[in-house]
Image: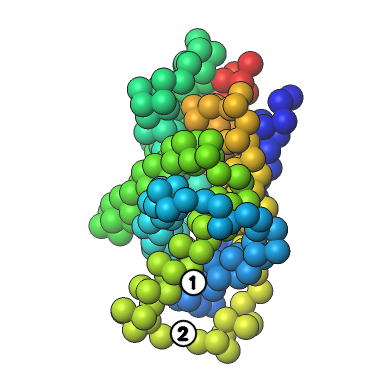
Amino acid sequence: MNGWIFLVIIYAVFRGIRDSIKKKALMKNSTFEVLFFYTLISFIFVLPASKNVNEVNIGYQGIIFLKSLCVFLAWICNFSAIKRLPVSFSGVMDTSGMIFSTIIGITVLAEPFSLFQGIGLVMVLTGLILLNIKKPANIQNDEGIKAKFVILSLMGTLFNSTSGIIDKVVIKYVTASQLQFYFMLYMVSLYGIYILVTKTKISLRTLIKNPYIPIMAVLLVLGDRALFEANANPESTVVAITLIKRSAVFVSILCGRLIFKEKNILYRVMCACIILAGIWVSIL
């Protein structure tokens, strides 16, 4: 197995766990309390490993800011949706982002697209379609809520996909540590400004008692560093990385069962297995 593939798998595992922990964190604090302190703690963790950040020129900083803005909007959408969607369902919905990333990778970045990648993409899409044929039990009787939050989840996926494309472009000109430093700096700034402008109330007492926030921060820092290093490898492509990242679905489904006791898990596991099989085919 190529080293960059292993790094993307590490990212996917950490992301799957992180997506599950989000719902636990949101049981104790509001969305923006979690978002702000989640990113702030992550930025603090990043500082010791940040090197030569002053060498990044303003142009590349602007590109990283654009990436941060995409993720800022994505997290708003995803955190709002995850409160009302099962962890396992929203995790599999995220696979739809691969369509956008694949199209951009091929048309804009001129990345190669092999027969095996095509077969893998079809298999992953099949898993997604099969999942949506069977509605999650806890939202099937509330079509209004379902439509609203599924759309939010898809919007978050679109913004995240755009961020992934930017990663592959900007990592050619900055190091992984520089990218991570400015990414987290801008994220903290964006959420801080939002909280100040909207006068969002912050409860420090409940935040201190929310152990899921620092855990999420650790998973974010380690997972993102692995992903940035994978993007820095010239052999990696956006198309392949996008497909491999979808293995996070399986982790989300298992966490949905183990942590939240969600039902209809067997069917979702079968869908996830089709998705994982498609990923395996794509990296042959």
What colour-coding does the image apply? rainbow
The residue at 63%/69% (across/down) is 44
- Going by the numbered disc 2, the residue's amino acid type is Ile
Quadrant of the image for the N terminus?
Answer: top right
Q: Is residue 269 visible?
A: no
Which mark is on residue 202? Answer: 2
Outermost residue, top direction? 115
Front-most of 222 and 268?
222
Callout 2: 10 Å neighbours few (<14), some, many (20+)?
some
Q: Position of residue 222 (x, y in %)?
A: 67, 53
Position in image of residue 81 (x %, y %): 39, 58
Residue 218 horizontal side relative to residue 84, left or right: right
Q: Quadrant of residue 109?
A: top left
Whole-angstrom CA distance, mark 1 to mark 2, is 10 Å
Tell me the kind of residue under disc 1. Phe
- In percent of width and height, residue 110 lies at 41, 20
Q: Residues within 10 Å of mark 1 (few under 14, many from 20)?
A: many
Residue 246, position as x, y percentages in the image: 54, 37
Look at the numbered disc 2 and give the secondary structure of its residue: loop
Q: Which mark is residue 196?
A: none
Q: Is residue 277 above or below residue 90?
A: above
Outermost left residue: 144
Residue at 40% in and 48% down: 59
Residue 195 drawn above or below residue 237: below
Which residue is more in the foreground, 196 or 161? Answer: 196
Residue contact between numbered discs 1 and 2, judged by CB atoms under 8 Å:
yes
Residue 10 visible? The answer is yes
**Tag 1 secondary structure:** helix
Task: Specify whether 228 is left or right of 143.
Answer: right
The disc at residue 36 is 1
Residue at the bottom extreme, as displayed: 205
